Image (cartoon, rainbow, N blue to C red):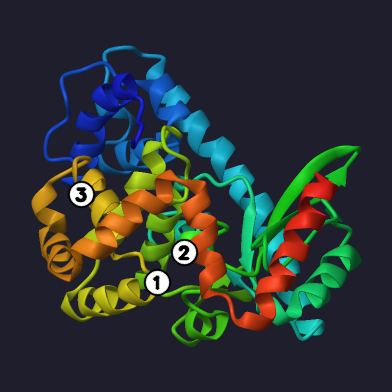
Amino acid sequence: DIEINQERWATLQPWVAAMLAGGLALPELDFPLEHAEQECVLPWLAYCLQKEWGQSKAPSSTPELTPKLRDSLRRWNLMHLNCEAELERLVHSATEHDLRFLAFKGHSVARTLYPHPACRPTSDFDLLIDPARVSVAQAWLESLGYSPLQNFVGTLWLGAQSWVIETDGKPNFHVDLHWDYTNRMYFRHRLTFEQIWATSRETPCGDAMLRVPCRVDDLIFACVHLAAFDPGFPIRLNWLLDIYLLMATLDEAQTSLLTERAHMAHATEACLVFGQLAGQLGDPAALEPVIQALQAAVQPKRMKAYNLTLRRRSLDLSSYWLRLPIKEKAAFFGDLFRWIRAR
């Protein structure tokens, strides 16, 4: 049920593999510029090509390619600088409001995994907060000029709320305010905010320090993000590239932590499934130690439950409801009713 664009994969994989191998050999193929842009790997490929070979060894006989690669880098760097300033504003303001948040998914891996943050395009800010502080976070975003795209929150039914800030009547920045790292019921209420915060780290953001998850949690969240898609939803290569790079950098201690943490998050199966798929981007042997550790940790019953639940929303919903404390079961249906009414 995992869907990727086979045509784009076929043209891009040789180039991605070459970059992952350190550019040992360039494919004797025309560079798939349009496909690279559609799969959001163009800035990374352009950066690697320009850094390793320079414009004198452009990967194509077409003279117009090098300026296009350079233009891609400029465009995404401008977007990165724009986001950098807004994230810095968010960090400073959150400190004044005594509010903790973690930037996760795109902005976390962009700043800690790639050679330059502009290599990893991302269109929004995914911010993870303590679920007990949702109202505080809403007031904080309002004070910064953001408006909710939908007013319904429902902390039991939903795990996030989207906010935008407009400039000249057009959306400028988009914040996904999360109080759980996924809205897919199978994975919800597995790792707490405090557990994630305890192993998080800081990374520079302008003259502020941005808090992001540890590398192991980044990997779990990247795999859960893809596993949460409905069957048949197309998966972009940049998401798989995140997973490949994350897995390839784990040492023995981090791999051991991954199996422990993924078990807690009920994400061992997701990490195995998408880790194996990501391995096809480059040399599968680079991920083999992590893949073997995950294979040893997978439980057949859990794999069956994972496959069944993610294919059937009704099972997904019921499994989540059963996990809720008794006092929250009735409140859950109140949440659900208000959400349906708001829709």
List the residue tagged with mark 3. 276
Residue type of the residue flagged with mark 3: Gln
Which one is nearer the viewer's eye here, 281 or 118? 281
Q: Mark 1 and mark 3: span between their CA atoms? A: 19 Å
Dot 1 amino acid type: Ala
Left or right position of 78 against 152: left
Rendered image quadrant of residue 61: top left
Q: Which residue is mark 1?
A: 265
| Quadrant in the rendering for residue 246 | bottom left
| CA distance separating discs 2 and 3 | 20 Å
Residue 109 shows in the view: yes
Q: Tag 2's secondary structure?
A: helix
Considering only order in the chain, which callout, 1 or 2, is on the residue closer to the N terminus?
2
Determine crowd level at label 3: few under 14, some 14-19, many 20+ residues with C-alpha closer than 10 A. Answer: some
In the displayed structure image, the side of residue 150 where residue 120 appears, left or right: left
Closer to the camera, 200 or 309?
A: 309
Q: Which one is earlier in the sequence, the residue at label 2 or at label 3?
A: 2
Q: Earlier in the sequence, mark 1 or mark 3?
A: 1
Residue depth check, mark 2 versus mark 3: number of the one nearer the observer: 2
Q: Is residue 119 above or below residue 104?
A: above
Q: Which residue is mark 2?
A: 187
Contact flag, marks 2 and 1 (Cβ < 8 Å): yes
Q: Residue at x 26, y 51 (%)?
A: 273
**Which x, y percent locates residue 15?**
24, 31
